[in-house]
Structures are given as structure tokens and as C-alpha cells.
Image (spheres, helix red, strand yellow):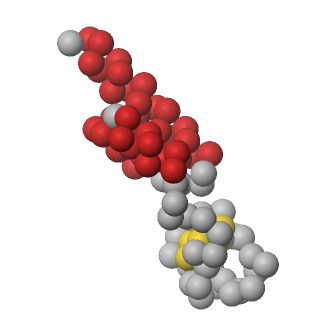
Amino acid sequence: MHAFWMITLVFGIVSSIIAYGKGRNSLGWFLAGSFLGPFALIVAFLNPVEREGMFATCPACREVVREAAMRCHHCQSGLDADYSR
Ligand SMILES: [Zn+2]
């Protein structure tokens, strides 16, 4: 049973590292990797959602926000719609 938990932990850590590198919620991806194992890993690698044109990084807090947003939902600072271009 030890090997199972080791594998679970490794998938969780790897998923969270990938997610962190892509500016995502690494805790959420740690949990996803732990529960879903290789499936979460594949999804984390493919990463089709947060590509250019849909998301941008908040200049104030560096969190990922929707590009069309007028206000950051993390730090509530106003966003200039053109800041990312
Ligand atoms: Zn922000």
C-alpha cells in the first residue's frame, strides 16, 4: 500500500509543478494530480484553456485573469483592457 501513496504523491507534485510553471493554481492541481494521477498530468500538459487571447496576467498581483475583465477578481485593482498588448 506504500507504493500506491508514493505514486499518488509523485503525480500530485508533478502536476502542481507544471501548473505553477503555467501560472495556475498549484494546490488545485496537486489535488487533481493526486486523485486523477496520469489523467490530470495529461490535461496539465495539454493546457488548452489559458492560452493567449483568453487570459492575461494581472499587472498588480500577477494572478491569471480574463483578458476582457475590467477589474482583477484577486486583488480588485482596475485593469486596463489594453495592458497586455
Ligand atoms: Zn490582481
| Outermost residue to the left | 1
Q: Is residue 53 visible?
A: yes
Q: Residue at x 30, y 39 (%)?
A: 36
| Outermost residue to the right | 85
Q: Residue at x 49, y 40 (%)?
A: 16
Question: Which quadrant holds the C terminus?
Answer: bottom right
Q: Residue at x 50, y 64 (%)?
A: 49
Residue 67 position within the rendered picture, expressed as x and y whole percent measured from the top left: 61, 79
Q: Quadrant of residue 78?
A: bottom right
Residue 18 position within the rendered picture, expressed as x and y whole percent measured from the top left: 55, 41
- Is residue 35 shown above or below 74? above
Residue 35 position within the rendered picture, expressed as x and y whole percent measured from the top left: 28, 38
| Outermost residue to the top | 2
- Is residue 77 shown above or below 7? below
Q: Quadrant of residue 1?
A: top left
Q: Is residue 32 left or right of residue 72?
A: left
Q: Is residue 49 left or right of residue 35?
A: right
Q: Residue at x 66, y 83 (%)?
A: 79
Residue 51 position within the rendered picture, expressed as x and y whole percent measured from the top left: 60, 65
